[in-house]
Image: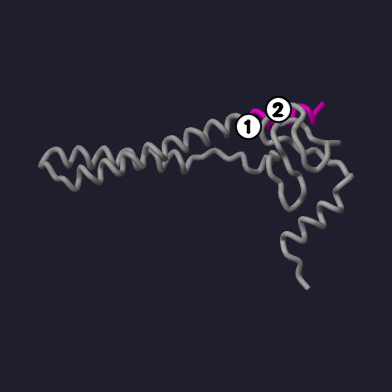
Amino acid sequence: MALSRLELERLAEDILADRVIIGNTYCGRCGYNLRTRPYSGRCPECGGQYNARPLRMQGVFDARLVVFPASDIFAALFTLGLGAWMILSGIQPMSEWHLFWGAVSTVLGVFFARSSWVRTARFFFFRSIVRRIEREEGE
């Protein structure tokens, strides 16, 4: 008989109720080492909530997710370029469709640019956490 996700979470809560994190596990907001802390709670450094139970893993830093967002930056630049080209080509012979779709592409490009900016900032922030963790573990 297979257990549902909710039943597995309840079992994990019962098993891990009085236990603490044994290995190096880091806060997803500030990079604080949560070792010897309960499996779920608030980070004592920044106050961010975390849940390090195996089925949850929320608010916990995972170094494997630190990847430079090159595809996001490319999508933003491509969409902004496409929008600018369509607007300029719509102005020359005055094509309403080119102007409309150029405006739509430019707005999408701005949204892509914003999300890629946020992801790039997160990348550099998390990369600094990775470096700090490597220094701490090397000592």
Query: Upstream in the sequence, badge 1 or badge 2?
Result: 2
Residue 99 percent location from the top left of the image: 20, 42
- Please, what is the three-letter code of the amino acid marked with disc 1? Arg
Q: Main secondary structure of the magenta part?
A: helix
Q: How many marks?
A: 2
> x%, y% of residue 120?
52, 33
Image quadrant of residue 49?
top right
From the viewer's side, name the closer residue of 122 and 70: 122
Residue bearing the label numbered 2:
46
Disc 1 packing (10 Å; few <14; some 14–19; many ≥20): some
Identify the residue position indicated by label 1 in the image. Answer: 127
What residue type is disc 2 on?
Cys
Return the residue found at the far left. 93
Magenta-tinted stretch: 126-139
Do the residues under discs 1 and 2 have CB atoms within 8 angstroms?
A: no
Q: Residue at point 18% right, 41% down? A: 89
Give the Cα separation between the discs numbered 1 and 2: 18 Å
**Along the horizontal axis of the image, is 105 left or right of 11?**
left
Q: Residues within 10 Å of mark 2 (few under 14, many from 20)?
A: few
Q: Residue furthest right?
A: 18
Q: Quadrant of the C terminus?
A: top right
Quadrant position of residue 100: top left
Quick check: 100 left or right of 11?
A: left
Q: Position of residue 71 (x, y in %)?
A: 47, 43
User: Viewer-proximal residue, 17 or 55?
Assistant: 17
Is disc 2 placed on a helix, strand or loop? loop
Q: Which dot marks residue 81? A: none
